[in-house]
Image (cartoon, helix red, strand yellow):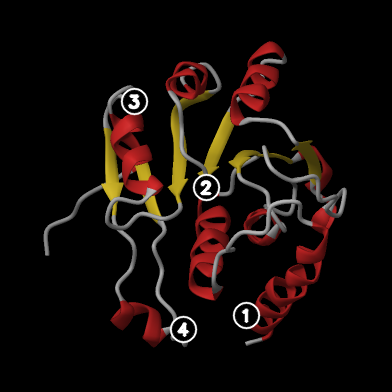
Amino acid sequence: NNVRNFFLDTMHRQNDLRDRADYNTGSIGPANAWCTFAVAKYFNPNTIAEVGTFIGCSTQALAYGMFLGSRKDTIASQRLILTCDLSNDIHLNDSPYGIHLEQFPKKSSVDMFQSMHERNIYADLMNIDGRLAHEDLNLIQKVVHERTVFILDDFEGLEKGVANAFALMSVLKNYGLVYPPDRELLSKHGFTDYCNTALLIPLSIVQLTNQ
């Protein structure tokens, strides 16, 4: 459909920013980007904090999800995405889809979380694409609330997403882990690549029903 095609085209265009990178790494694929978009659209956050900007694929996915998930009475410019990248200084669109974007180029996640804490900014959704340190965990507890949802990239094997999940669950109370979607589910939605995006969700917002 039009939403999907526009979304995938936007993700493809972000790759034009690679030549501006000081540290050129891999980026998320279409399935990971779509899952990130879907999470932001479903949970409809007002404030997102992201660790790992790079060329902005996940940033764009989050912004598009926020935009489409917004209620008609919500002003997009009142919504905020904060995103940091320790290795790069790639300037993104200041207001994708009218949403305010605040970048922390060449800054660590500790720097961003400390800034959020000092300004009393709390994330409704947090996208983690970087290995968290002990200092991160101390600050994260100060910039989230009991309904904050976490997106974890690279959740497979011994990658950083798995380490981050265990680290976060050691300090967060009453959270459940949602594993990445399998290939069969992705293929039903037209994706041929795989997804390694997992979620940590507060159990207070989950309702289980009998089959």
Nearest to N terminus: mark 4 or mark 1: 1
* Foreground label between 2 and 4: 2
Residue at horizontal 67 percent and vertical 74 percent from the top:
7
Relative depth, front residue between 24 and 4: 24
> Of marks 1 and 3, which one's residue comes earlier in the chain?
1
Tag nearer the camera, 3 or 2: 2
In the picture of the structure, the residue carrying the numbered disc 1 is: 4
Q: Position of residue 137 (x, y in %)?
A: 44, 22
Is 203 displayed left or right of 38 in the figure?
Answer: left
Q: Which residue is mark 2?
A: 129
Give the foreground label among 1 and 2.
Answer: 2
Q: What is the crowding at mark 1: few (fewer than 14 residues within 10 Å), some, or many (at least 20)?
A: few
The picture places residue 25, in percent across and down from the top left corner, at 61, 59
Say which quarter of the image contains residue 200: top left
Q: Position of residue 136 (x, y in %)?
A: 50, 24
Please name whichever residue, 140 or 21, is drawn nearer the observer in this view of the structure: 21
**Quarter of the image where the N terminus is located:** bottom right
Looking at the image, can residue 73 be seen? yes
Residue 191: image tag: 4
Marks 1 and 2 in Cβ contact (< 8 Å): no
Question: Measured along the vertical axis of the image, is residue 41 above or below residue 152?
Answer: below
Q: Indicate the amino acid at tag 4.
A: Phe
**Could you tell me the amino acid type at mark 3?**
Leu
Q: Earlier in the sequence, mark 2 or mark 4?
A: 2
Check disc 1 and report its element: helix, strand or loop. helix
Task: Give yes or no for contact between labels 3 and 2 (Cβ–Cβ under 8 Å).
Answer: no
Element type at mark 3: loop
**Cα gap from disc 4 to disc 1, whole angstroms:** 11 Å
Closer to the eye: label 1 or 3: 3
